[in-house]
Amino acid sequence: MVATEDVGRVAAELLLETWNGKRIVELEGPRRLSPNDIARVFSAIFSQTIRTESIPRETWMELFSKQGMQNPLPRMQMLDGFNEGWIEFLDGERGSRKGLIGIERVLDRLIHAAPTEA
């Protein structure tokens, strides 16, 4: 997970850098998060207990379809990759560039943002 503000900042920094050939820059947030970490942040923001709940894999196809997804299989495969650890940055966590904006700041801004008129 990475804040869009970090994506924009790093993109701007990269435009100012010089290099030759192909370059891959892997970007993630300042620290890796679990669903329980995110629930703790929501709990703090809303001043009430928020908890995570695992959804059995055998129910994903039906659940994602009911949510309007026409082809849930790629999403399921992506989740399997994260859950099983085979989707990872080339050099793992030590090989990625780290963002500066934490989940606490992102969620607080989203939740407390003033509504905009359409």
Image (cartoon, helix red, strand yellow):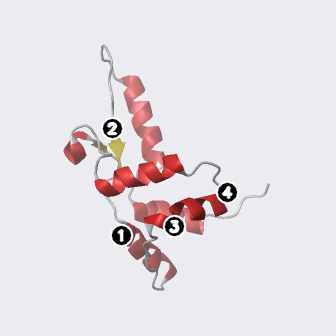
Q: CA distance from mark 3 to mark 2?
A: 32 Å
**In the displayed structure, does residue 62 sit left or right of residue 101?**
right
CB under 8 Å between discs 1 and 2: no
Res 51 → quadrant: bottom left
Question: Which residue lies at the image location 43% right of the left edge and 49% below the top edge?
Answer: 78
Q: Which of marks 3 and 4 precedes in the sequence?
A: 3
Q: Mark 3 and mark 1 in contact (Cβ < 8 Å)?
A: no
Question: Which residue: 28% across, 52% down?
Answer: 85
Name the residue that disc number 3 marks.
59
Q: CA distance from mark 1 to mark 4?
A: 28 Å
Pick whichever, 41 or 63, lies toward us. Answer: 63
In space, the residues marked 4 and 3 are separated at their CA atoms by 15 Å
Q: Earlier in the sequence, mark 3 or mark 2?
A: 2
**Pointer 1 residue:** 37
Element under disc 2: loop
Q: Residues within 10 Å of mark 2 (few under 14, many from 20)?
A: some
Amino acid type, callout 2? Glu
- The amino acid type, in three-letter code, at marker 3 is Thr
Circle nearer the N terminus (1, 2): 2
User: What residue does disc 4 label?
Assistant: 68
Q: Say which of 20 and 16 sits in front.
A: 20
Residue 19: mark:
none
Q: Are marks 4 and 3 in contact (CB under 8 Å)?
A: no
Work out whether mark 2 precedes mark 4 in sequence or the reverse, and give the earlier one: 2
Mark 2 → mark 4, Cα distance in angstroms: 31 Å
What secondary structure is found at the residue carrying circle 3? helix
Whole-Å distance between the Cαs marked 1 and 3?
A: 24 Å
Viewer-nearest of discs 1 and 4: 4
Residue 26, which numbered label?
A: 2
Of badges 4 and 3, the one in the foreground is: 3
